[in-house]
Amino acid sequence: MSRINNSTATLEQDRTQPKPAPIERRIDSKTLLGDEGRVIIEHDGQLYLLRQTHAGKLILTK
């Protein structure tokens, strides 16, 4: 009867286990846009305007 090296089996199991999904951040649009209904976002040195329309939709413009 041969012996099994448990440390090797454990390492192999660790490599095959799926990683937990990252937790997604969630921000309420009212919090993000404030009372004005708009916010300027800086991304890679560029400025973008995110605003809410009268119909309640969001528009992102450069």
Image (cartoon, helix red, strand yellow):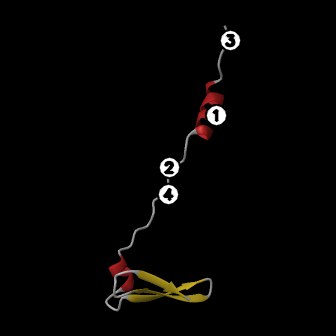
Q: Which residue is mark 3?
A: 2
Q: Nearer the viewer, mark 1 or mark 3?
A: 1
Amino acid type assigned to the residue bearing label 1 in the image: Glu
Q: Which residue is mark 4?
A: 22
In depth, the one of 16 and 39 nearer the eye is 39
Q: CA distance from mark 4 to mark 2?
A: 6 Å
Q: Residues within 10 Å of mark 3 (few under 14, many from 20)?
A: few
Please tell me whether mark 3 sits on a helix, a strand or a loop: loop
User: Furthest residue to the front?
Assistant: 55
- Residue at 43 percent across and 88 percent down: it is 39
Please tell me whether mark 1 sits on a helix, a strand or a loop: helix
Please tell me whether mark 4 sits on a helix, a strand or a loop: loop
Q: Nearer the viewer, mark 2 or mark 3?
A: 2
Q: Residues within 10 Å of mark 4 (few under 14, many from 20)?
A: few
Identify the disc placed on residue 12. Answer: 1
Q: Nearer the viewer, mark 4 or mark 1?
A: 4
Amino acid type assigned to the residue bearing label 3 in the image: Ser
Amino acid type assigned to the residue bearing label 4 in the image: Pro
Quadrant hosting residue 10:
top right
Say above or below: 16 vs 59: above
Are the residues flagged by discs 4 and 1 in contact, CB closer than 8 Å? no
Q: CA distance from mark 1 to mark 3?
A: 19 Å
